[in-house]
Amino acid sequence: MKQYLSLRRQVLTRLREELPSHLSYHGIEHTMDVLNVCDQYIRRYNLSQEDRTMLKIGATVHDMGFLKSPKNHEETGANMAEEMMLELGMSQKQIDIMRGLVMATKIPQSPKTELEKIICDSDLDYLGRDDYPEISEKLFKELDFMGIIKTEEEWKNLQISFLKSHSFHTPFAIKNRQPKKEYWLNKLLNS
């Protein structure tokens, strides 16, 4: 746990100080949101102390690669986190779990373990929440800045396509986030 707290402090400080300001979605607030949702899963599920720590590490570092580039940020971030974890004396097993957690969040998500399912659902939890419009607006601004999308119509179509193709993985999210996600999808389809 001491190693995690040291890692968390280092990563959050770097994200706060070094992330480009145009990252309106992939900023420190997103990382803190994912950490918060992971904490909710930790309280909900009977996870071992090691699994709790690994989930928190995964949530903390999952978008750290944006410090270098949005391209392949998962791989970049996993490599950055591995260096930090080695410096903190963490085991290869822990590094492998962290890498699996980070890579599982890559779109399209492909979680293999229970922890990977939790982090994937935590990463995209907002899709089934009341704050979806505000958070998706941040992503729109970020993608617009990067030149990935050019118009509101493109953005709407991208959202519809993404919401249709996305699946939640945990029983909690399927029960408690899927209905609201479908509500947002229908709203987009009928606008």
Image (cartoon, rainbow, N blue to C red):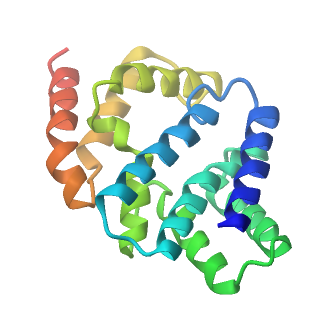
Figure quadrant of residue 120: bottom left
- Is residue 180 visible in this depiction of the protein? yes
64 vs 159, left or right, is right
Towards the viewer: 44 or 99:
44
> In the displayed structure, does residue 166 sit left or right of residue 60?
left
- Compared to residue 160, the image places residue 11 above or below, namely below
State the residue at coordinates (19%, 60%): 171
Can the viewer see residue 111? no
* 175 relative to 7 in the view: left or right: left
Q: Left or right: 70 with respect to 36?
A: right
Residue at the (64%, 22%) spot, across then down: 145
x, y percent for residue 146:
65, 28
Q: Residue 108's spot in the image, x, y percent?
A: 41, 56
Query: How many labels sit on residues?
Result: 0
Residue 78: x and y in percent read: 68, 64
For the N terminus, the image quarter is bottom right
Look at 42% across and 69% down and name the residue there. 115
